[in-house]
Image (spheres, rainbow, N blue to C red):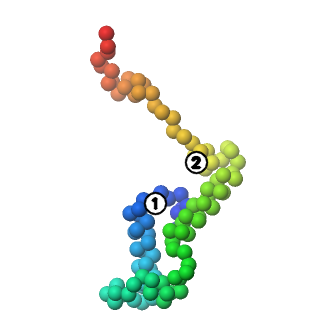
C-alpha cells in the first residue's frame, strides 16, 4: 500500500483491487468460492462490514498526501511537480526538427 497516495486509479484497477481485497477476506475466513457465500456475509464473518473498503482508505491517504504537499515550502520538488503545467510546443519548431517543412510555400 506504500505509494498508493499518488496512484492513478482507472476503473479496471479499482475492480482488481476490490476483488483482491475480497479474496484476502475470503481466505482469512477459510471459505472457498465454491461455497457460494456472498461477499456481504464474508464481511460479516470477518467483522469488517461497517468498515471502509480499501478504495476508501486509498482515497483518504491521497487527500492526506495532497494536504502534506500543499503545506510544503514553495521550492520543494514534490510541490513543484504537483503544480507544474506543461507548456504547449510550437508546431513550427517541431516540424523543423523533424524535417516536415520540405515543401515551402512560395
Q: Quadrant of the C terminus?
A: top left
Q: Residue furthest top?
A: 106
Question: Residue at the location (46% across, 31% down)?
Answer: 89
How far across and how far down the image is residue 36, in percent?
34, 87
Badge 2: how crowded within 10 Å, few (<14), some, or many (20+)? few
Badge 1: how crowded within 10 Å, few (<14), some, or many (20+)? few
Q: Which residue is mark 1?
A: 9
How far across and how far down the image is residue 26, in percent?
42, 84
Question: Residue at the location (43% across, 78% down)?
Answer: 22
Q: Which residue is mark 2?
A: 82
Element assignment for label 1: loop
Question: Residue at the location (39% across, 84% down)?
Answer: 38
Q: Is residue 27 above or below residue 16?
A: below
Question: Residue at the location (42% across, 89% down)?
Answer: 30
Q: Is residue 52 above or below residue 28?
A: above
In the picture, the disc for residue 104 is: none
Element assignment for label 2: helix
Q: Is residue 106 left or right of residue 28?
A: left
Reading the chain from its start, which is encountered first: label 2 or label 1? 1
Distance of label 2 from label 1 (alpha carbons): 17 Å
Q: Report the number of discs.
A: 2
Amino acid at each position: 500500500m506504500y505509494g498508493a497516495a499518488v496512484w492513478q486509479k482507472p476503473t479496471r484497477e479499482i475492480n482488481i483491487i476490490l476483488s483482491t481485497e475480497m479474496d484476502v477476506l475470503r481466505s482469512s475466513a477459510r471459505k472457498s468460492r465454491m461455497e457460494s457465500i456472498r461477499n456481504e456475509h464474508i464481511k460479516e464473518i470477518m467483522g469488517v462490514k461497517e468498515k471502509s473498503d480499501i478504495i476508501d482508505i486509498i482515497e483518504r491517504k491521497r487527500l492526506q498526501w495532497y494536504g502534506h504537499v500543499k503545506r510544503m515550502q514553495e521550492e520543494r520538488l514534490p510541490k513543484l511537480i504537483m503544480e507544474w503545467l506543461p507548456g504547449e510546443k510550437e508546431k513550427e519548431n517541431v516540424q523543423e526538427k523533424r524535417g516536415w517543412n520540405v515543401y515551402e510555400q512560395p
